[in-house]
Image: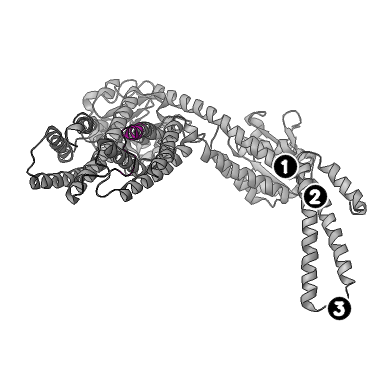
Amino acid sequence: MAEALFWPAILGYGEAALAYASPRYTRLATWGVRLGWIAQTALLAVQAARVDGFPWSSWAGSLNLFVWFVVGAYLIWGCQQRYRLVGLSVMPLAALLFVVSRVGGGTTSGTRSHYGNLFLTLHVGFVLAAFAGFTLAAALAALYLLEERRLQRRAPDILRLKLPSLVVLERLTTRTILVSLPLLTVGLVAGFIRLRQQNGGMDALMAATIVTWFVYAAFLGIRPTGRRGARLALIGFALVIVTRVVLAGSHF
Amino acid sequence: MKLSLVGISHHVAPVELRERVALPLERAASLARTLGDAVCLSTCNRTEVYLAGDDGSRALSSLEELAGAPLRSVAYRMHDEAAALHLFRVSAGLDSLIPGESEILGQVRAAFDAASPGPILDRVFRQALQLGKRVRTETAIGESPASVPSAAAALAAQVFGDLTGRRVLLVGAGRIGELAAGNLAARGATIEYVANRGIEAASELAQRFGASPLTLDDVAGKLGEVDVVLTSTSAPGLLVSAADVPSRRRHPLFFIDIAVPRDVDPAVHELDGCFLYDIDDLEAVVTETLAGRRVEAEHAERLVALEAERFREWQAALEVVPAIASLRARADEIRSAELAKLGSLPEHERRTVEAVTAQILNKLLHLPTVRMKEAAAAEDGATYADAIRHLFGLDGER
């Protein structure tokens, strides 16, 4: 069942990724995002129903959940027809990661999880949700830098290929981090409780995640504006990439 | 011939001629009423009379009377599908000087509302209004600005988003600066200061925007208080240098310099958080957006063609409507006569027989009705209608 639901989801995301390339098909793209996300939600629900405990414990499974969070956050924050370029930057990445998740076996059902512990479930779920938020914040920050560059270069097509305004991009980046950092905090606290219960030790991924927390906390503390703020959000995201991709195998 | 159009527009007539036949809404509606089943659309770029059941000769004479000159060489006359197609292009903004401009849709609606159109004009204008909205929803034809003042406001919005509460310093009391300031104000910005060499002109314009007047010497001191600086003076040298701009670490400052020679030092653009657009930059943006409108216009033309085809089918179906009505009336007449022969029946039985015979009639006539409408759309409607009249002896009712 879960396997079957992968196809409508990837079809929706893939269609959106392609349709965003043309201004004429943005409405179709929006529907692709919505329908794909509904199908992926159903897929996750089936996975959750079939497994005891937390079903996205593998790196591929967590990637599946991560994509769902990213697309969900995109649907809430930025899925508007007139901002086609935002969709064009988010949806191809989401579709690609979703395919990678499937190749890694993250979209199947029936795998028994060794994460039955509530604290651990909270830990993985909240950390992934936070990372998805940071990914979206990074996309918004990158779009800020792009739009600022276009304004600096006085690009003649700036009103034809529209992005949200600088102020809106800056505000959304800050808000997304403002929502994501508490999620990461809860996820980390849950992880530390579990670590303490099992008398475990620190590993490289945990250290990198803590550094990531400090970078985003600094972002909210200093509230840098303009290009400095966008760059700091991207530095934070670079650490997210390190923890999610480079060090992922050392933790799961 | 059921729908006709007579008119002149910016495509065929110079402004000297157009202004003589341009009518305010009330007079246009009055002209339409004198012509019968008509709608008169009169704007600065066109005066057009749409008529039902008339070839347009009287309308042309009326326009010539207004112009005080013969219009036969410049006026266009169109009929039926061509007239509908033209109206659809007009309401979609495709016949306008600036493709996709939105004002025309309101003018078409006003002309329609002011008239008392019959069924054909009612149908074609409703279709035109729906299409006008659809074109602006489904294409990006009207999204980008088409003039330097509106591009200036759109660019400011590209930095700040919603301009509500954003403070503007207008330097120069010239016409183009006023227009650009008007565009910014229309998007919610507050014109805070108006600076000019002569304080009287500044005061006059400031009063219009509810702003404070300044002299040019005060400009540098106000740069820290505003979000947008709009300059359009005829001063020979620079009025704002990079050194005048305070450090803006938290909020961007957007300069729009429409003046020639320029009022703002180009080095301002290099400052952190500052953006400067001069007249050349704005014109490049407008050129690009107009090119974009032309691309979108191709898509809009396809929507217009589809709508014109729908109107043609509807109009063609009208040709067979009298034959269909006669056929149904004859069938009902026969049914009523036969029912009368039944004599006295209990009420519930009579109702059953009436219902059954009505059903038989409807089922029997459904297919011929559909086929006749299809044939009408394929231009065979008159032949089919004649055949029906002949076969069922409806000739006398033609």
Chain assignment, label 3: B
Asked if residue B21 can be seen in this view, the reply is no
Q: State which quarter of the image contains the C terminus of chain A.
A: top left
Question: Which region shows up in magenta?
Answer: A96-110
Q: Foreground: B279 or B140? A: B140
Q: Nearer the viewer, residue A205 or A28?
A: A205
The tag on residue B368 is 2
Please determine whether, in this image, residue B328 is positioned above or below residue B265: below
Kindly indicate the quadrant of the structure image that contains residue B100: top right
Q: Position of residue A75 (x, y in %)?
A: 36, 43
Query: Which residue is under mark 3?
Result: B344
Q: Earlier in the sequence, mark 1 or mark 2?
A: 1
Looking at the image, is mark 3 or mark 1 nearer the viewer? 3
Task: Give whichever of discs 3 and 1 has the lower sequence position.
Answer: 1
Chain of the residue under the numbered disc 1 shown in the image = B
Disc 3 and disc 1 in contact, CB within 8 angstroms:
no
Provide residue A144's location: percent of width, then percent of height. 30, 32
Percent of width and height locating residue A248? 20, 33
Q: What separation in Å lies between label 3 and label 1 (alpha carbons)?
A: 47 Å
Label 1 SS: helix
Few, some or many residues within 10 Å of mark 2 (<14, 14–19, 20+): some
Alpha carbon distance from label 1 to label 2: 17 Å
Can residue A106 be found in the magenta stretch? yes
Q: Judging from the image, what secondary structure is the residue with disc 2 in?
A: helix
Closer to the observer: label 1 or label 2? 2
Along the horizontal axis of the image, is B250 left or right of B5?
left
Which class describes the residues within 10 Å of circle 3: few (<14), some (14-19), or many (20+)?
few
Indicate the amino acid at tag 3. Answer: Ser
The amino acid type of the residue labelled 1 equals Glu
Query: Do the residues under discs 2 and 3 have CB atoms within 8 angstroms?
Result: no
Q: Are marks 1 and 2 in contact (CB under 8 Å)?
A: no
- The residue tagged 1 is B313
